[in-house]
Amino acid sequence: MAGLCVLLAGLALHDSKLWQPAAVCTVVGLAMGIGVVPSLKGYQFTAWIAAAVTAALVYPAAFLQWGSFDLRGKWVILLVVQMVMFGMGTQMSLRDFDGVVKAPRGVLVGIACHFSVMPLVGFGLTKLFHFPNEIAAGVILIGSCSSGLASNVMAYLARANLALSVTVTALTTLVAPFLTPLLMKLLAGTLVEVNFLSMMTDIIKIVIVPIGAALLHDYLKHASAQNRRRVLLLAATSVGALALLACGGWGWIARNFSDSAQTLLSLPGFLLGAVVVGTVYHWLTLCLPQLDRLMPVASMAGIVYFTTVTTAAGRDYLLQVGALLFVAAVIHNAAGYFFGYWLSRASGLDKNSARSVAFEVGLQNGGMATGLANSMGKLATVGLAAAIFSPWMNISGSILANYWKRKPAQS
């Protein structure tokens, strides 16, 4: 309350030395206190995102560089996004893919709607609002990414078809390395340079590799002793291969192969790393069983990190187009829910399955969009849409999930 009073006084007096720190203290206090109210606890993560955005807007320089350490460094953002994806992946299971056999029509409808509605609506919004080229490319990019794992949480809260939701999320993630670059090339190729091969490999590194490591952990939970030994041997071999790459192997590749070939040849190193990480993490969970429960928290912390850095880097752009970007986020998200639900119903899916598809279409993988924008070297522009769209998706998804929870489907 004191922070709010100082904030209002600072705004009334036009004194930035008063209202700026008060604004940050107020939103941080709100984020900490909102968890005390049971009915609002589900919005605490969103409150932390709001606090991060506010702090980055008020004090952008504090979130760009610490001494000689660049908080926006390409490898820093890559590792943070990979950690986020790995943490989310620990909540997935190989059994999630069983849904392909059990409900093929629902899965096909979900994938088709996801990779048609959202990219096209995003493209339409860029024409409607006349965003600068790189901002517009960011809107199309987040529309072209795979489903976010938040969709599974929302489907669970809404008591919709959770199995279908999880399966569609898993499969949109698997096909994203091919469909996302294709959609970006078709819809955003005139706005920014889109290298199909480079974007495809970046998605594999950013999404498939960390989630693959998490699924290896899941496999080891149920594997026979003999198969565990085989994986352990593979991990040891991977360590040796990575050591060879570090001790001159990659330098030799860089001297003897073209840039395109190097892009492809970098993938095996990441895949070997996934084997090592997945194996090591599994053995760590045997010693620390609570680790799986902590990983989603680490993921949320990672999301807060790259949202803060992206907002700080793109502050000037955000002040120019932030309001329009938010309006675009609301329209884009609502269109996903609307078309996802009604196209599913038109395809013959039951109401609970249609609700799941609505979440799958409406909720995008913001971490993937941020990682790709970072790989393109355009975090402050192309990455800005993800920083705005992601918090709103969490808010709207929670509201819709709770509404549907109170309105059980009858058929």
Image (cartoon, rainbow, N blue to C red):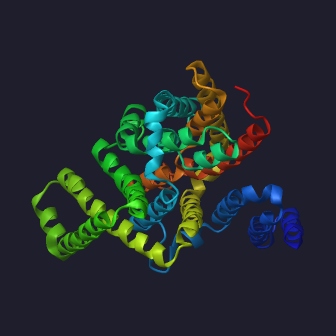
Q: Residue 148's x, y, as percent?
A: 54, 47
Q: Residue 312's x, y, as percent?
A: 58, 62
**Vertically, is 218 above or below 144?**
below
At x 39% / y 44%, what residue is drawn? Answer: 174
Quarter location, residue 361: top right
Q: How many marks?
A: 0
Answer with left or right where residue 263 lies relative to residue 61.
left
Front-most of residues 80 and 20: 80
At x 48% / y 48%, what residue is drawn? Answer: 382
Location of the N terminus (image quadrant) = bottom right
Q: Residue 60's x, y, as percent?
A: 60, 66
Q: Residue 19's x, y, as percent?
A: 79, 68
At x 29% / y 63%, what residue is drawn? Answer: 227
Q: State whether residue 297 appears in this view.
A: yes
Q: State whether residue 133 appears in this view.
A: no
**Vertically, is 211 above or below 80?**
above
Answer with left or right where residue 38 lies relative to residue 369.
right
**Vertically, is 122 above or below 368?**
above
Quarter location, residue 262: bottom left
Front-most of residues 233 and 157: 233
**Vertically, is 66 above or below 331?**
below
Location of the C terminus (image quadrant) = top right
Front-most of residues 309 and 57: 309
At x 16% / y 63%, what residue is drawn? Answer: 254
